[in-house]
Each structure stands twice: as C-alpha cells, then as structure tokens.
Amino acid sequence: MAGESPTIAANQARTFLGLWTSLVPGLTADRAVPDRLNQLLSRNRSFGSRDRRMYRELVYTGFRYHSWVANALSESNEDALRALVWLSAEIPAMGRMKSFWCDGWPPTPNSVDEKQSILRSRTARLDLDATLLPVWLSRECPQACHPPLIDTLHSRSPLWIRVQTDDHQRLREEFHARGWKVTSSPLLPQAWRVAAVDEDLTTSQAFKLGQFEIQDLGSQILAAAPPVRKGTHWLDACAGAGGKTLPLAQRVGPGGRMTAWDVRGAALAELRIRARRSPFSNIRIARPAPGEVFDGVFVDAPCTGSGTWRRAPYLKLSTHESTIREASRNQLQLLNRLATHVKPGGVLAYATCSLCKSENHQVTSEFLDQNPQFRRYPLENTFGYPDAPDSGELTLMPHVHDTDGFYLACLIRQAGQAPSQ
C-alpha cells in the first residue's frame, strides 16, 4: 500500500472509530450531530485543519451509507473502514488515506448500483442489501429511491456562492490569486460554483467586505423565483440567518424595504452580522406588528430537511413518518398565521427544503382549501421545470441542477380580499 505509513493509518483508523462510537448513540433522534462532532474534533488539539476535514468527511460518508456499514463499524471491521475511505469524496484531505486503504481500487463511480457492485466483489460483512433511504420516502418522493436522484443524494454537495457586488472582475482576481476556480451558473449569473470545496472562503477579503455569501444554488433559485418587484416591501417571516433575506433585499432594491424576523435569537444574531457586512441598507430586523401588511411574505418554513440529505446525511437517520406529520401540521398553522400579513394583491411564497409531498404540495393544497381568498400565482422564473409555469409550484430536484432539494409555491391574495384579523 502507498501513501500513509501503516502506523499512521492505524492511528487514524482508531481515531475515526472513536469518533464514530461517540456519535452513534442517539442518531435516530439527534438533529444536532454537527455540534457534537465539532466539539469532539475541537477537543483534540493535535488535529490540524486537514485532520478535521478528513475525519468529518469519513463521518459524513458513514452517515450517507449508514445502513451498509454501521453494523460492521460497530465491530471495528477493517472492510467497513476501507469501504468508507473509498466511498468518501475525492478531496485533498482524503488523499493520503485513500492511497493507503484503497491502493489498486477503481475510481469511485457516481452510481449507487455500481458502488454496491464493486463493494460486493471487494469486501465482506457489509450489509449491501440494506436500503440506503428510509422505506417511507418511496411514498413521499418516489423519485428519490431511483437513479439519478438516489445517486445525487449520495454524493457530496458542491460549493456555491452568491455574488453581492457588481465588480465581478475584482472578485475573480482575488479568487484567482488564492487558486480558487469558479464557474458562473447559466441559471443565475451571480451564482458561482467554487471548485475548491475544502477551502475556507470566509478568510478572503471579499467575504469580509460582503461581496459574496456562501449559499447553495437551489437556495438562490428559491429567492429568485417569486415575483418580487422593485420598490416593494417584503417580509421574510422565518428568516433564520438571512439566506433569503439578503437576495430578496437585493431584488426589492434601494427603493424597497425588507423586514426580517425569526423566533430563534441565535439565527437573528447571525443575520444582523450578515446584514451589516452586506452592501444592502434596506433591511430591517423586527417582528411584524399585529395588522401590519406587506406586498409579499416569504415563509421558509421549518421542515424535516430531506432536500438537504446530501449535505446533512445525519438527518435521514432522525427523520421518521411521525416527524413529517408533525412538521406538516406546524407548517399549515404557520402559513395560516402569516397569511394575515399579506395585503390584497400581495404574494405569499411558501418554501421548504423538503422533498416530501406531505410538507409541500399537500400543505399548499390544504391552505388553499381553508383560504379561498388566495389562489396560485405564476412564478417569476421556473428554471426549466416544465410544470412550474401553470402550477405556481416549483420542486427543485437535486439531480437536475446539482443543488439541494427545495419546494416553492407562490400564492396571491386576490384584490379586494382584506386580511382577516
């Protein structure tokens, strides 16, 4: 075997298995796994940035292929470790480990079926007949259980940024100086894909000056799809850290206003930092007053997050049918409450990062049944999805544009239909 020495490789294997053993308890209920992993990695002062990236990649690959490797990893099975190394992404931090554990192995294919076939021929005691996705997902999103979507859900997410400056040339020059290769998306010119997925872009001067934000292309599409007009006043009602607030503020322009609110204090604190760093001066962070109405209300509702499973694979282990039922009830209640802030002729945009129909189309349909003063409204841009223009709904499938998965529905309060108080 080439690359790492046997001693170093053995130590890395023990360290990984120790991390894995610490994380496994509670996986079926714990949605804060990243925090636990960060705490574990920060406790070991001998870890450099490369070590942390390597162990994080191995852990996340373990979550992605949990049903195949979990039992074998619990027995410290060497085949399971070798499989994880081989299945992990081709990033610099994994280079030496791959050269030791997978010397002579073929390149990792994109197809889940091909990965399964190669592992069958080269490993033993892995549960390769186990399904990688929960059985209930076949009812919520049948496409997810078949190629090409299942293949994309079991790949590493790309790195996208959203450019917030008109001086694209200067931004490209700094990225070029740092060796960061970027490609502009044909869908949105301000969306750039960064090849250096392991680099910390927040160290750049451009980031500190608010010239860009790190944001998945799908999330950018979500903010670009609703019919937002210059000079209007919008509410981002579940703003979080501002992933939709900032691009919506850019869309309404200096003559418009953007109000943002969230019940989570920590998220709002992060939004304040991002808003101050951004070039936009039209953002107000405040709870909407009773009876206050807006030209548009964006509801990026809390959800189960199945659209982000390639980025956050631990979520599929803690998401159950009961989780979805509870989420959809809460989403409908939230939509009913926030709809009162939409003025006549105004737009209500409902979004999730879920692929589950129970959280998406079903919630929208139930809301419309209960609120006849609203109707579906055409999207500003449908980004190549053929059914979206007529339905007023858009479901972003990760394999189509290499994004996370999202859902968006645009509804309009018909003129003359005043909000109920």
Image (cartoon, grey):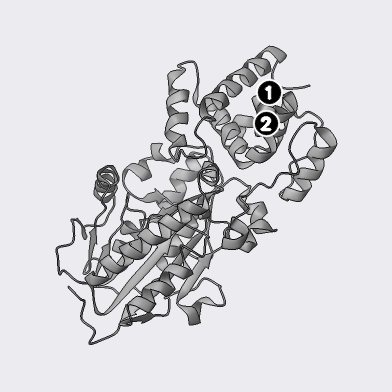
Q: Amino acid at mark 1?
A: Glu
Q: Residue furthest front?
A: 322
| Image quadrant where one finds the C terminus | bottom left
Mark 2 residue crowding within 10 angstroms, few (<14) / some (14–19) / many (20+): some
Q: Is residue 378 left or right of residue 72?
A: left
Q: Residue at x 68, y 12 (%)?
A: 7
Q: Is residue 43 left or right of residue 72?
A: left
Q: Tags 1 and 2 in contact by the CB under 8 Å rule?
A: yes
At which x and y percent is residue 125?
77, 31
How far apart are the alpha carbons under marks 1 and 2? 7 Å
Which residue in the structure is indicated by mark 1?
Answer: 75
Choose between 116 and 221: the one closer to the eye: 116
Q: Is residue 314 above or below residue 349?
A: above
Choose between 98 and 255: the one closer to the eye: 98
At which x and y percent is residue 336?
30, 68
Which residue in the structure is indicated by mark 2?
Answer: 71
| Image quadrant where one finds the N terminus | top right
Q: Secondary structure at mark 1?
A: loop
* Image-quadrant location for residue 281: bottom left
At which x and y percent is residue 255?
21, 69
Q: Residue at x 45, y 16 (%)?
A: 45
